[in-house]
Image (cartoon, grey):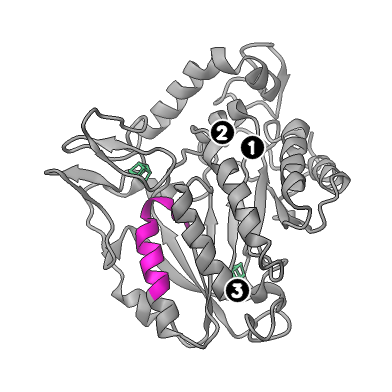
């Protein structure tokens, strides 16, 4: 049970860690912003990550994501992977990255499995081996250990325990693990954004190695890459039968800032660009949106705004609504309730969205 420091309302869906309810965050966003920024700075400092994106005068620019960091000698970027070392920006390279990987048998618990070739056979025979779920095949799941967001409910927060001085992991063996039965590669994390040059380079080489055979390139991302980069990611997915899964975490800026510590402006801008690209290949869908139903915060107003945003671009973009599990700093909220999901599904339908999915159903609770 948390209490909003502004309106004094008490509810199980108010996080004591955030300290404010969604309505007050939206209403008094500017006044509350310094407190929210301090909260995120504290949670980053605990892991030795920069408290905010460095913008050092005369520093080396990094243009991979929405932060556009400028790093002076010795400084790390917001993501904690790129560092100015003696005037050079050092971090991942085509031979190595801050990464781990494994083979995941298909069909897998993938955000897009309700519409993708691996989960449904959509796109068979050009992009899928089978006309249904691709049993007997596998996804090469590539986990990038860094992120350009600071989500308080990160399910994979353990990557933050990596020491900043650890060297990149050689990725030659990733090619060896690209076995014949691997039919898709999915880059996730963390987020692929800060290490996108490595992912793009690996994808191009992998596609060359498997020329004429099925190998889909897919991404799970917060969508805040610099636009030319996310366009290139989409091009690889479009050509290979894969997809980009973009997390639309919240629509209102103060809610997004509170949950993720950063703005959603680049994500929304990129999403519009991606929809235009994705319309060139509607089946299997090249773009899939997802939203975690965070109790109390990703509420009716946020769902309505996200639904309206997607529908204004295309009603056929698949949207996966995911149930929330309390973890990391947001461990004082309940799991998503049935009432919350029913409300979200009904809003999505009211906007005429044609491909809606509910993920993580096993987490649904009867509470609140
Ligand atoms: S990838 Fe993004 S967060 Fe990391 S250094 Fe570059 S601009 Fe900054
Ligand atoms: S990685 Fe791509 S093709 Fe494979 S299961 Fe996930 S969305 Fe489907």
Q: Is mark 3 within 8 Å of ligand 2?
A: yes
The stretch of residues the image draws in magenta is 188-204
Q: Nearer the viewer, mark 3 or mark 1?
A: 3
Residue 188, compared with residue 329, is above or below; it is below
Label 1 crowd (10 A; few <14 / some 14-19 / many >=20)? many
215 with respect to 119 (left or right): left
Q: Is residue 264 above or below residue 129?
A: above
Residue 62, magenta (yes or no): no
List the single residue furthest toward the left. Answer: 86
Place residue 61 in its image quadrant: top left
Which of the 4 image quarters holds residue 332? top right
Of mark 1 and mark 2, the one earlier in the sequence is: 1
At x 31% / y 32%, what residue is drawn?
54
Task: Provide residue 5's location: percent of width, then percent of height.
Answer: 61, 13
Q: Which residue is mark 2?
A: 259
Element carrying mark 3? loop
SS at circle 1: loop
Between tags 1 and 2, which lies in front?
Answer: 1
Residue 48 seen in this snapshot: no
Closer mark to the observer between disc 3 and disc 2: 3
**Residue at (63% x, 21% y) in the render:** 25
Q: How many numbered badges does the structure rendering display? A: 3
- Residue 223: % across, % down: 53, 48
Cα–Cα span, label 3 and label 2: 32 Å
Quote the CA–CA distance across marks 1 and 2. Answer: 8 Å
What secondary structure predominates along the stretch shown in magenta? helix
Tag 1 near tag 2, CB within 8 Å? yes
Between residue 94 and residue 147, name the one nearer to us.
94
Q: Which residue is mark 3?
A: 241
Query: Where is ligand 1, by quadrant?
Result: top left
Mark 3 vs mark 1, CA separation in Å: 28 Å
Q: Would the CB of label 2 be found within 8 Å of ligand 1?
A: no
């Amino acid at each position: 049970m948390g209490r909003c420091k502004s309106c004094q309302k008490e509810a199980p869906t108010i996080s004591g860690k955030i300290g404010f309810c969604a309505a007050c965050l939206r209403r008094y966003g500017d006044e509350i912003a310094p407190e929210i920024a301090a909260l995120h700075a504290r949670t980053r400092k605990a892991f030795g990550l920069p408290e905010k994106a460095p913008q050092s005068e005369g520093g080396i620019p990094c243009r991979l994501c929405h932060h556009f960091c400028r790093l002076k000698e010795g400084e790390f970027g917001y993501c904690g992977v790129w560092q100015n070392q003696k005037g050079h920006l050092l971090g991942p390279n085509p031979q190595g990255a801050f990464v781990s990987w494994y083979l995941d048998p298909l069909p897998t618990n993938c955000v897009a499995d309700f519409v993708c070739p691996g989960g449904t056979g959509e796109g068979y025979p050009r992009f899928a081996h089978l006309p249904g779920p691709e049993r007997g095949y596998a996804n090469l799941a590539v986990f990038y250990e860094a992120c350009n967001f600071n989500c308080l409910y990160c399910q994979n927060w353990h990557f933050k325990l990596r020491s900043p001085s650890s060297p990149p992991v050689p990725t030659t063996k990733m090619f060896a693990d690209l076995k014949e039965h691997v039919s898709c590669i999915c880059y996730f994390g963390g987020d692929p954004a800060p290490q996108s040059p490595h992912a793009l380079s690996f994808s191009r080489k992998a596609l060359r190695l498997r020329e004429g055979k099925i190998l889909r390139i897919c991404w799970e991302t917060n969508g805040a890459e610099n636009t030319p980069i996310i366009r290139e990611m989409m091009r690889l997915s479009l050509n290979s039968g894969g997809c980009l899964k973009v997390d639309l975490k919240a629509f209102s800026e103060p809610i997004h800032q509170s949950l993720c510590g950063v703005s959603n402006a680049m994500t929304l801008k990129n999403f519009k660009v991606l929809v235009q690209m994705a319309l060139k290949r509607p089946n299997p869908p090249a773009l899939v949106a997802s939203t975690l139903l965070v109790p109390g915060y990703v509420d009716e107003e946020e769902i309505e705004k996200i639904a309206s945003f997607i529908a204004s671009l295309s009603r056929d973009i698949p949207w996966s609504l995911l149930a929330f599990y309390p973890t990391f700093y947001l461990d004082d909220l309940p799991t998503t309730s049935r009432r919350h999901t029913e409300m979200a599904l009904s809003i999505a339908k009211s906007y005429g969205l044609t491909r809606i999915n509910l993920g993580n159903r096993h987490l649904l609770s009867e509470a609140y």
